[in-house]
Amino acid sequence: EAGVAQSPRYKIIEKRQSVAFWCNPISGHATLYWYQQILGQGPKLLIQFQNNGVVDDSQLPKDRFSAERLKGVDSTLKIQPAKLEDSAVYLCASSLARGNYGYTFGSGTRLTVV
Amino acid sequence: ELKVEQNPLFLSMQEGKNYTIYCNYSTTSDRLYWYRQDPGKSLESLFVLLSNGAVKQEGRLMASLDTKARLSTLHITAAVHDLSATYFCAVVFTGNQFYFGTGTSLTVIP
């Protein structure tokens, strides 16, 4: 089974620029998550999708972050404009459905804002 | 407020010793995960605990869950250097909301 694919692996941008990350979950996984992991901290949930609907985006800084999962498959997370404090690893995870299922994480995108 | 706390945050232990990492969470959940993360790598699933009193063991690691106390423990037996990593617990709350603890950075010293 292919894992959760994320791209790019690394990105360096200047503050106030825009950036987008892409995630392709495991085939058939209905639930998709985006996490932000700042160095030395635990992953923080940004947004959770169930198919193409948003279940939880309470911790997403909506003034600059947006995410979509238009066809209920792959997803894009965008930051516009980026700030220095957005430097982090952005992890995507997916799970089959609600219930007692495992969660699989992608390798992440490491963003550095300079 | 949904909150997951771990302690200690940092743990340095000698090879061969035993130790326990604690994970407390703020509200009802019947599902808890433990993950391992090596520097620069993604998260590797270790255990999923699905009910009160659940205990899982793999090698030198054993995890347990007490849903009444809202507490999970990860016990390390006779630590070896290869166990050096950061360990996270993650709790699934109502609505399939998946929240991580603060992490415990473990260093095993030869």
Image (cartoon, rainbow, N blue to C red):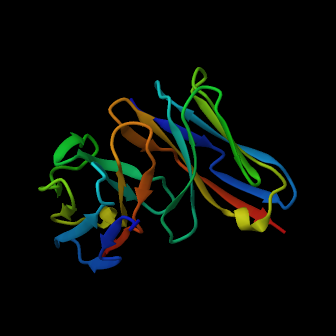
Is residue B100 shown above or below B85? above
User: At which x and y percent is residue A52?
Assistant: 16, 49
Is residue B99 shown above or below A24? above
- Furthest-top residue in this view: B68
Seen at 75% across and 54% down, the residue is B59
Seen at 57% across and 27% down, the residue is B70
Seen at 18% across and 53% down, the residue is A72
- Front one among B39 and B64: B64
- The number of numbered badges drawn on the structure is 0
Tell whether B94 sits left or right of B54: left
- Front one among B70 and B96: B96
- Which quadrant holds the N terminus of chain A? bottom left
- Which quadrant holds the C terminus of chain A? bottom left
Residue A15 location, quadrant: bottom left
User: At which x and y percent is residue B102?
Assistant: 52, 47
Residue B109 location, quadrant: bottom right
Is residue A56 shown above or below B27? below
- Front one among A103 and A65: A103
Tell whether B83 sits left or right of A41: right
User: At which x and y percent is residue A58?
Assistant: 25, 40
Seen at 15% across and 55% down, the residue is A68
- Furthest-left residue in this view: A70
Tell whether B99 sits left or right of B85: left
User: At which x and y percent is residue B1?
Assistant: 38, 29
